[in-house]
Image: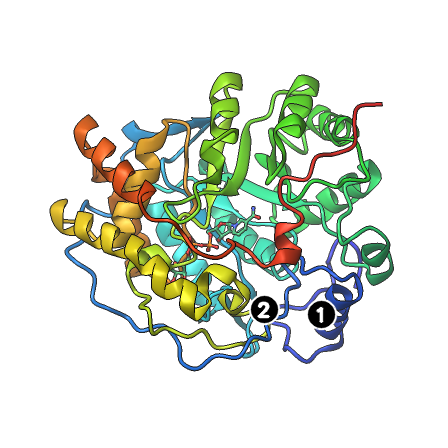
Amino acid sequence: MTQNGENIPHGHKPANPQRRQLLATAAAIGVAPWLLSACTAPSASTANTAAPAQPAGTGILPTSQRRKLGALEVSSIGLGCQWVPAAVEGSVSDRYGSTIDRKTAINLIRTAVDSGVTLFDTAEAYGPYLSEEVVGEALQGVRDQVVIETKYGFSFDPKIAAARGGRDSRPEHIKQVVEGMLKRLRTDRIDLLYQHRVDPQVPIEDVAGAIKDLIAEGKVLNYGLSEPGIQTIRRAHAEHPLAAIQNEYSMLWRGPEAEVLPVCEELGIGFVPWSPMGMGFLSGTITAETRFVPDGDREFRVAVPRFAPDNLRANMALVDVVKDWAQRKNATPAQIALAWLLAQKPFIVPIPGTTKIAHLKENLGAAAITFTGDELRELNAAVAAVHIQGDRLPAGVLQMSGIEAPPKR
Ligand SMILES: NC(=O)c1ccc[n+]([C@@H]2O[C@H](COP(=O)([O-])OP(=O)(O)OC[C@H]3O[C@@H](n4cnc5c(N)ncnc54)[C@H](OP(=O)(O)O)[C@@H]3O)[C@@H](O)[C@H]2O)c1
């Protein structure tokens, strides 16, 4: 495998040597990086699929509702494109047990473009490389109409990964991997490039310095950070203005409300919530009886504490809130979850992931849902009244979130 992934084949089989090597790397470094986590918890059946209420909106995003991530203008809802190799050659899987063939994934992205979506999220680590390849192929003909955001920051070389806790944001590494990203994304520039996780061994000033060089070369237009600590945000922004922070945020995990959102507001930085649907939980298709089936890194939720049986049962109170509001607003639970995010701040742009065109269209309908001030206060209070049980991520993955880089030299 070359560093830029040029000779990484599409649709790896789970048992191929590269895959085994990646999983071994995760085990060797004693952490469960987002991309490498092998899920082993026992479970019984998959999610059931309760029928949604009536979808709201037209499934087309109006240009009048565009939002700003720093200087970048994007559609109010983006599309998350996180796919890993499926068990079936030529297909891709999300991290939540759904598999689609590559053609369907490309069609999904193109349908999103036709529906007014301009923001597409991917990462070098998704696959790795596979998601960027699919996104690049899908967007090739419409490159100038869209904003592509991707992420660097992990090492896929077992020796380097073991020595560096899985992460690698050394300036020379960033510059090297960007070359591979440009090839896979079939473009000459990355609109928004994130550091996927803070690298405690590299001062954020050095990371920003590498990005500034890439911006000067025209290979990167804007940059962001994913799951950084507050001081890291301030220090990076002082070096060069950040366009966006990408953290987990939804009704199910409201951590960013304490510090990150206020800092974004203060500094004029956009905010992109990942897992805006709570990894599918807020769509109302999961019940207290749902058990997730281990399937390598194709079903992540088996390893997530808040979805463990007892926690899941307690956390269903939040689904009741979402379903109640779906009825009140003549919408679906998924739409309420996204509309709630959009209503929190005007600089928030969620990137829901889906494998289905019907869900894509349904999700875009969230942009048509508004809340009065009183409604929003009531909904916020109902959400806040539910005390979510269980951590949002497995311990090894959580460890990498919000870690502060060493003090400025
Ligand atoms: N920066 C980071 O560290 C980070 C981490 C994780 C994710 N991300 C990004 O964030 C994106 C979104 O997050 P996510 O995919 O983890 O979680 P999510 O968007 O909260 O949830 C995705 C799940 O929700 C389901 N879903 C979506 N719309 C639905 C609907 N209308 N009705 C019923 N189910 C629905 C999907 O199933 P169906 O396929 O059946 O629709 C899928 O199982 C990812 O694609 C990725 O780009 C970033």
Label 1 environment density (alpha carbons within 10 Å; few <14, some 14–19, many ≥20): many
253 w.r.t. 95: above or below: above
* Mark nearer the N terminus (2 vs 1): 1
Quadrant that contains the N terminus:
bottom right
> What kind of element bears circle 1?
helix
**Can residue 70 be seen from the camera position used here?**
no
- Give the side of residue 227 with respect to residue 213, left or right: left
> What kind of element bears circle 2?
loop
Quarter of image, res 160: bottom right
State if disc 1 and disc 2 touch (CB < 8 Å): yes
**Can residue 74 be seen from the camera position used here?**
yes
Residue 390 percent coordinates (x, y): 48, 57
Mark 2, residue position: 297
Kindly identify the amino acid type of the residue bearing the numbered disc 1: Leu
Residue 212 percent coordinates (x, y): 72, 25
Mark 1, residue position: 23
Quarter holding ligand 1? bottom left
187 w.r.t. 3: above or below: above
Query: Which one is nearer the viewer's eye here, 326 or 42?
Result: 42
Residue 226 percent coordinates (x, y): 59, 40
Kindly identify the amino acid type of the residue bearing the numbered disc 2: Asp
Query: Which one is nearer the viewer's eye here, 370 or 401?
Result: 401
- Give the side of residue 33 with respect to residue 348, left or right: right
Quadrant that contains the C terminus:
top right
- Give the side of residue 367 with respect to residue 179, left or right: left
> At 68% from the left edge and 33% from the top edge, which residue is drawn?
219
- Give the side of residue 12 with respect to residue 270, left or right: right
